[in-house]
Image (cartoon, rainbow, N blue to C red):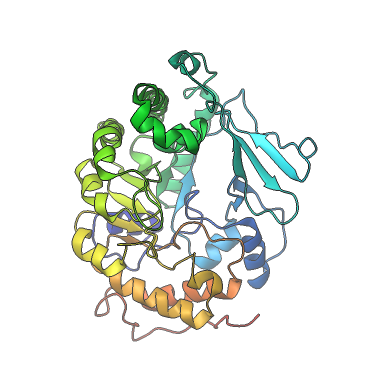
Amino acid sequence: MNSRQRVKMALNHQEPDRIPFDLGGTVLTSIHVNAYRNLRRYLGLPDKDVEIMDVFQQIAVVDEDVRQKLGCDCRNVAPRSSATFKIVVDEDSMPGYRFFHDEWGIGWRMPKDGGFYYDMFHHPFANSTSIDDIKNFPWPDPVDPARFATLKESARHVAEDLGEPVILGGLAAGFVELAAWTRGFAHFYPDLVTNLDWMTYLMDTIIDLKLAYWEVALPLVGDYADVVQEADDLAGQFGLLINPETYRKIIKPRHKKIMDFIKARTDAKIFFHSCGAIREIIPDMIEIGIDIINPVQVSAVGMESSALKRDFGNDMTFWGGLVDTQGVFTTGAPDEVREEVRRRIDDLGANGGFVAAAVHNIQANVPPENIMAMWETLQEFGTYGHGGVGQRPADYVPAARHDKP
């Protein structure tokens, strides 16, 4: 069974030979460059220049030697940048920081001393008072041919030559996120109440750009696409960021428009990323056609993994949730990581519907010992067909443990 077959079975709520494993298959299931360099050294692999998959998150493209060593099942197939845009990092103009502006006009900066990520510092619509500002904004061209120059061949290569699932990337972040990032959080949330016409015009403009991209990308990639990525962070650690009534009135219908558009053009499953305590709106997500949720933030309120599987496991695939990146993965010992991974396999693995990955990207300070403890436990207990997932196969031969370098 190859990786593409394995993942497709899991997404169809069937049990393949083993639980699929994702490291680097999306910009939401990868690894910070610092942790990645440490992992490569720990595995005895040569140092090399690390390619950045996403600049503001500072996450790595996982190289083939690591993918082969760990048996990574998922592969990101993403559009290129527009021909008219390239990220240029300014090292000199802002004391203490390096910074850049993305193609949406959002400014990002990272401390030169000890910085791990880029954070937003400029929002192009922060001082906007008129819809004309939105109309006249220099929006990115979603259908610039440069974006699609290698997309079809990349998808074909992944599906046919590598036997891996095509995880098709979108134009950008979700429309809620982009509206908040271009407007600024201090204005975004009040605008949903006091300036709704302006805010919905902004949201709908972003949605039109996203749909224009999908209109080209989906037919181009065709049946090679196995998973299509969309996203919007709708919750925090303790609850939704927007109350359920506002979500259902303003946000949900617009998400449904996007999901319907995608579903009309592909049989691929829709992967939807939302951090936080989203349990309350998972039924809404199922209703509008979302097939997969990520990152399955098990440390958030209401996101207990066994209850999620019990209540939604027939309708939703859980992609993530293998180990808590906020807690034990960063601060625990390898045996504590093993204990949590075993529990998540037991909770989420039965009857397919589970792609194993850490909760969001592996952070900069996660020790390589803990990464390998996660991986080893998945190899040991993530196999189907021997009395149930979570049971060690009779012929299992343990890998060398990596508690110490």
Which corner quadrant holds the C terminus? Answer: bottom right
User: Is 354 placed above or below 394 here?
Assistant: above
- Residue 393 in percent (x, y) is at 34, 82
User: Is 381 placed above or below 49 here?
Assistant: below
Asked whether the viewer can see residue 348, the reply is: no
- Residue 162 in percent (x, y) is at 47, 52
Camera-side residue: 327 or 161? Answer: 327
**Residue at 35% across, 26% down:** 196
Residue 10 lies left or right of residue 366; in this view the side is left
Q: Residue furthest bottom?
A: 394
Asked whether the viewer can see residue 303, the reply is: yes
Residue 29 lies left or right of residue 230; in this view the side is right
**Residue at 28% across, 40% down:** 247
Camera-side residue: 150 or 353? Answer: 353
Q: Residue furthest front?
A: 194
Residue 85 lies left or right of residue 340; in this view the side is right
Camera-side residue: 232 or 40? Answer: 232
